[in-house]
């Protein structure tokens, strides 16, 4: 079974600051490299939402979700969580992100 979640990325400044706090140091550094504030905000919100959605499925806090770069640089669960069987994909365009989740049987 696959679950699809759609999220808006047009958060206000205070929400973005709050969401940024759950990102890893590497993700925060990556966010700072975006030239345009709009793109920085979209990355922060999209990645924080991914962490929140994965945290709910893994029964951990968003900050405890460990991500790694998989094939072609796509995010995937780090080894610590890999045995839980969750797989996901993220796609985004402008102010919308779509997350798809599935779990091994």
Image (tube, rainbow, N blue to C red):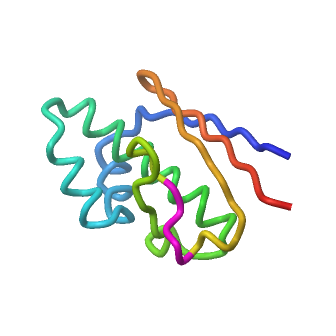
In percent of the image, x 40 and y 39: which residue is there? 11
Foreground pick, 53 / 69: 69
Count how many numbered circles sit on residues in the image: 0
Quarter of the image where the C terminus is located: bottom right
In percent of the image, x 34 and y 48: which residue is there? 16
In percent of the image, x 24 and y 57: which residue is there? 28
Foreground pick, 89 / 7: 89
Task: State yes or no: residue 77 in magenta.
Answer: yes
Residue range (magenta)? 76-80
- Residue 38 higher or lower than 76, as above or below: above
Q: How far across and how far down the image is residue 95, in percent?
A: 44, 26
Say left or right for 62 vs 11: right
Say left or right for 26 vs 72: left
Say left or right for 52 vs 46: right
Foreground pick, 48 / 14: 48
Please identify the residue farthest to the front as the structure is shown. Answer: 71
Res. 21 image quadrant = bottom left
Res. 89 image quadrant = top right
Q: How far across and how far down the image is residue 71, in percent?
A: 46, 47
- Residue 71 higher or lower than 7, as above or below: below
Q: How far across and how far down the image is residue 43, in percent?
A: 34, 41
Please identify the residue farthest to the top as the structure is shown. Answer: 94
Task: State yes or no: residue 39 in magenta.
Answer: no
Q: How far across and how far down the image is residue 7, in percent?
A: 57, 36
In percent of the image, x 77 and y 57: which residue is there? 103
């Amino acid at each position: 079974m696959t679950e699809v979640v759609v999220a808006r990325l047009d958060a206000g400044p205070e929400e973005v600051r709050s969401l940024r706090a759950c990102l890893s140091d590497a993700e925060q550094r990556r966010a700072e490299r975006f030239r345009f504030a709009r793109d920085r905000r979209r990355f922060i919100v999209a990645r924080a939402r991914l962490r929140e959605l994965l945290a709910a499925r893994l029964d951990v806090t968003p900050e405890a979700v460990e991500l790694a770069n998989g094939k072609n640089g796509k995010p995937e669960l780090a080894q610590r969580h890999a045995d839980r069987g969750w797989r996901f994909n993220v796609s985004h365009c402008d102010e919308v992100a779509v997350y798809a989740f599935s779990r091994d049987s």
